[in-house]
């Protein structure tokens, strides 16, 4: 283990590293931190993410936000304006392309050129580093809503420098959530360290009075992730961010599809994070939550996709999440047209509006679900702290090594990959294999019983085939992957 | 040696693409169908596909691309195979291959023109490609070669 | 009051009346009851509505059914086959045109001719009486699912004769539900009497071993109808039908939009009907339920319409209704294309499939809602029986005269039209004005409190303007019609 | 007499159409806007509209049709008005006027050609038609007549 630890980076060290970071691509040289802070301060209130989220939190709204990004700035502004005006989005994203996510700025440059030549976007997002901060500011100035950077970048330091100076007011990702599901062989120590830099940067803005929001990526691999697994990652990234001075945090969760479990997940995410942050002495953090509509395979049929989107919007609204990230009826076909993107937003807006004043009552089953999630999260996080000898950063690295944290279906070689999820007989996600997760016996027994119930109903053993059936189920019009007839 | 008779497929997700789940299911489905999978995983470049195919004497390379950059990432793989002396190897490609909603026929033609033997739209079941593989390999064994762009479906 | 009473029509009297009924239009002469009964018996099992409903009830499915009908038989078969194959409908309808509903067979004939000339349907449904039983049978024989007659016909005797002989296995409507919301000045005594004939006809089929299903029309005027009001009508029509020998009954309810109230409505509908039927000695009735997706104004935007459809499907599935009647994304624009109709079905299918194994837990609030509905229904029905001196038919007529039963927004002059509904602060439908409904004081107080809560929140008095705002709300993207800003 | 100065509108739902709610709201909106409504309700035929207009000396007839038979039900109303000596009366029509999804421009032209002064698509707010009414009546008072098919919106 290197000298990684969960400790605020000293200012001198941060600025020294900063010099190197800005050299990674020519556009880095344009960033002047003092000037950037002033630029952020001068942003009108309605373009500040933290302010909008706090307002929603107070009024019990669930805000809606799309995913969207294209290679060139004019097209990006056109797309995002459309999603604002026609799609009725409350918050805007700029999704970053996959080359930039891998710091492959040369490939991104080629993508920009090809996009210009072809007259259509050849990149799956906006290469903000290549475009540089002035172009980012033009984008921000052309839009009327707060804009967040959404990406999947293991080393997102330069991207953060450029986009924060560029006027974005929210930054997604984290050292765990943008590594394990997004990289194959990048070490966790490196990404945690690199994200400490990002958080330190945003903490620095915060110290100067600029409220920038941070959002760990909740859904991880996006398919059948047990709530406790993603909660553990969200809480760890919240603790790591808070240590670096971040004050505004949105924690996320990806819909699994069983309503009670999804509502329990958002409620426990808030309750647990609040409790851990307070216990660790970070008592001035403003917490909000984000619910991601189903991130797994979608039906090809657009009408059915609308139903999946609406069901996600329903669970988001009933869970009381602060915002919901919206899918589109083209989801199964790849990157959507702007019309399809607006369609997903409008359907979602209708649902969250109709459900604004409704909620799910606290029931015995909801309590039980919440209780299980809390026990699991606490058991895992206790072990993380123990492994880290009191240090959350060290503990995280060691926990992944030991499989104490384990994310299903993740591509990273630093992930154990031993746990296996499957749905129970009402569609809630359970553990078919708990791998090395340090779960209490009663919790394990609960999950086993739930899966046994399904096995009995379906008259088959729970195997990898059941998992595959579950993965394909929603795309095929069902929630639970029942045996084929 | 029983394994010798099994067809071998190199599979992976090309480019900067990290979509891991389909890749894992495809590996599982190949095993179930008695095909030997050589899974080079996500974020693999063209050279990694070719090297793995040469090393394992594979019968086919299955390229997945789910994130929309397929058009840029997949170009030139046939040439790289030729350079490595495996110019005749079966090349299949599948996934969300391009950005935006384009007609599947156009997308298919684009990839067949690049030298892929078969191209699959999103939502294709593994079994479909496995059936084609067995069909193509039989044809290959019988004829010694295969019509590279035969639109068999 | 005429000699109307809730008593099975003697066979002789029935057959005498029958001669007159069949003379109303030339196609009536083709009906031979014995031959028709044999035809119904020979129908394959998968075309029998009662069998399919019973199977769904047993397996806990929620079946999906569209509305659809066009002027000409070939186009009708094409449309309905499309809704079966492409739309994945479980049950099919034939919606009857509005001229036939008014027994205006000459106008219907003209509509058929104009439709032939214009090459498109000039009627809003299928004029089954004009087409006659052979054409009906061709339609039934060309389809692969059970088919129900859906209409809105105050005097539906001839239509019943022709369609039942024509192989339809389910008949919607009733002497109250197809009068008060569907007619302006037709007397309730006449329609109750005419529907006794329809029920007697279907009871006769039943005596001969043919299980035809009957479905009172649940949603009535379709907008903000308090559950107890529509339940009273459904239960009365169930009692009237049972007396004439009907054994298979599907009782309906139209979505209001608050999930707890909607689930409470379907559960109490089943429980109350079962209790009244048993108490009155009809103990071999097979009861099922139908949930109608929101029947009021829809958003113009198709994406938003999908959301309303999905929310309806969600409430249907979570309420455990046996079937759901599906709207289309063209709802706001009038009669939909077949593609739009299939789209609504597919979205609904995806939701009911994903929610098949989920349900809403019995909670205190659900119990309270159920309790209120039951108290209201029992209070009204007690009074109906009292007014009828023990006779439900007589009681119904007198109850409408007295406003003891009162349907909001109904066009009939035989409806008092004194009650006024409005949403409370969570969107449940309450009484702004209880008119002459004989509700217990504690129930009235409950509704008043709920509306006062909303009035306070909105800082305005509950007036007709609030009702109008509520009527337009879903069309404008909200559930509750909050004051305009 | 204050009432004399109020414009009077005969409103109703034509044909075999029983949609009652919009009709009730329209009546309410007219009252609120200081227009005198003469509501003949649902399921009204052309003669009933004309008779009510003659009896009350109405300034306009507002025909609603929500069930798709509007094309058949609304034809000839202008002629019936002429026969009754009120050929110049303002005729507005609105609702789901035809069956199936047709372009609104085509539907509007169809009804303007039938002699209606204005036609409204589904989802129109009562206020829109009330504003037009006041506009048209002013024009009428000023000019003595009105261009029957003026496409004012």
Image: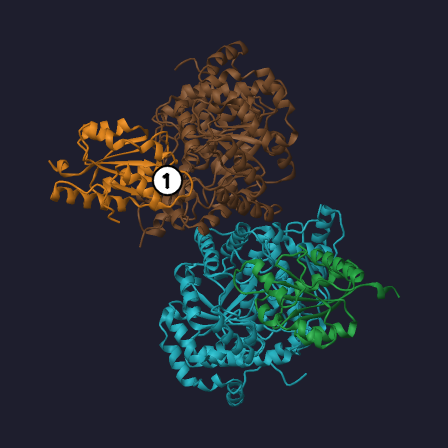
Chain colours: A cyan, B green, C brown, D orange
Which quadrant, please, contains the C terminus of chain A?
A: top right
- Residue B80 is situated, as x and y percent measured from the top left of the image, at 68, 75
Looking at the figure, which quarter contains the N terminus of chain A?
bottom right
The residue shown at (49%, 36%) is C68
Q: Is residue C474 left or right of residue C268?
A: left
**Above or below, comparing residue B69 to residue A320 in the picture:** below
Residue under the point 43% across and 53% down: A353
Mark 1 highlights which residue? D96
Asked whether the viewer can see residue C91, the reply is yes
Tally of numbered discs: 1
Q: Provide the chain ID for the residue under circle 1.
A: D
Q: Position of residue C360 (x, y in %)?
A: 56, 46
Q: Left or right: C469 with respect to A297?
A: left
Q: Position of residue A415 (x, y in %)?
A: 68, 71
The x, y position of residue B135, in whole percent, is: 75, 57
Name of the residue lying farthest toward the right: B1
Vertical placement of residue C382 versus A251, above or below: above
């Amino acid at each position: 283990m290197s000298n990684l630890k969960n400790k605020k980076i000293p200012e001198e060290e941060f600025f020294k590293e900063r010099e190197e970071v800005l050299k990674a691509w020519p556009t880095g040289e344009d960033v002047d931190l003092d000037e950037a802070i002033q630029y952020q301060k001068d942003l009108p209130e309605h373009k500040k993410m933290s302010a909008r989220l706090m307002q929603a939190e107070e009024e019990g709204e669930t805000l809606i936000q799309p995913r969207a990004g294209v290679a060139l700035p004019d097209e990006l502004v056109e797309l995002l304006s459309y999603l604002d005006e026609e799609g009725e989005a409350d918050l805007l994203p700029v999704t970053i392309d996959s080359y930039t996510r891998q710091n492959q700025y040369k490939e991104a440059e080629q993508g920009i050129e090809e996009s210009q030549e072809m007259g259509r976007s050849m990149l799956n997002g906006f290469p903000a580093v290549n475009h540089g901060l002035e172009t980012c500011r033009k984008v921000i100035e052309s839009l009327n809503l707060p804009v967040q950077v959404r990406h999947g970048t293991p080393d997102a330091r330069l991207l953060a420098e450029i986009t924060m100076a560029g006027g974005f007011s929210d930054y997604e990702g984290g050292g765990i959530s943008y590594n394990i599901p997004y990289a194959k062989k990048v070490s966790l120590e490196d990404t945690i360290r690199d994200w400490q830099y990002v958080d330190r940067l945003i903490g620095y803005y915060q110290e100067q009075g600029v409220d920038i929001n941070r959002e760990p990526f909740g859904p991880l691999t996006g398919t059948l992730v047990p709530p406790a697994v993603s909660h553990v990652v969200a809480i760890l990234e919240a603790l790591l961010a808070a240590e670096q001075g971040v004050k505004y945090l949105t924690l996320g969760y990806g819909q699994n599809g069983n309503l009670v479990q999804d509502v329990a997940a958002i409620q426990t995410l808030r309750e647990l994070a609040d409790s851990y942050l307070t216990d660790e002495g970070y008592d001035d953090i403003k917490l909000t939550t984000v619910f991601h509509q189903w991130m797994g395979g979608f039906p090809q049929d657009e009408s059915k996709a609308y139903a999946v989107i609406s069901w996600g919007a329903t669970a988001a609204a009933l869970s009381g999440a602060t915002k919901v990230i919206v899918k589109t009826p083209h989801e199964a076909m790849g990157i959507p047209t702007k019309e399809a993107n607006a369609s997903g937003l409008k359907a979602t807006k209708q649902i969250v509006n109709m459900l604004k004043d409704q909620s799910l009552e606290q029931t015995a089953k909801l309590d039980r679900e919440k209780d299980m999630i809390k026990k699991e999260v606490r058991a895992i996080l206790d072990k993380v702290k123990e492994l880290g000898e009191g240090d959350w950063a060290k503990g995280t690295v060691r926990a992944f090594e030991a499989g104490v944290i384990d994310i299903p279906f993740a591509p990273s070689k630093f992930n154990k990959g031993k746990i296996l999820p499957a749905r129970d007989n009402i569609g809630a996600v359970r553990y078919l294999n708990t791998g090395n997760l340090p779960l209490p016996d009663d919790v394990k027994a609960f999950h086993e019983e739930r899966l046994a119930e399904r096995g009995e109903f379906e008259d088959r053993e729970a195997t990898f085939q059941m998992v595959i059936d579950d993965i394909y189920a929603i795309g095929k019009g069902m929630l639970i992957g029942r045996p084929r007839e | 040696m029983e394994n010798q008779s099994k067809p071998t497929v190199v599979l992976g997700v090309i480019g900067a693409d990290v979509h891991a789940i389909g890749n894992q299911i495809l590996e599982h489905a190949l095993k179930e169908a008695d095909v030997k999978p050589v899974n080079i995983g996500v974020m693999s470049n063209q050279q990694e596909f070719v090297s793995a195919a040469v090393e394992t004497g594979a019968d086919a390379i299955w390229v997945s691309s789910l994130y929309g950059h397929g058009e840029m990432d997949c170009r030139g793989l046939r040439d790289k195979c030729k350079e490595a002396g495996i110019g005749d190897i079966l090349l299949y490609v599948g996934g969300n291959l391009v950005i935006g909603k384009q007609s599947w026929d156009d997308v298919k033609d684009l990839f067949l023109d690049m030298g892929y033997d078969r191209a699959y739209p999103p939502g294709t079941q593994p079994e479909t490609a496995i059936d084609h593989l067995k069909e193509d390999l039989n044809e290959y064994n019988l004829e010694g070669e295969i019509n590279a762009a035969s639109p068999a479906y």
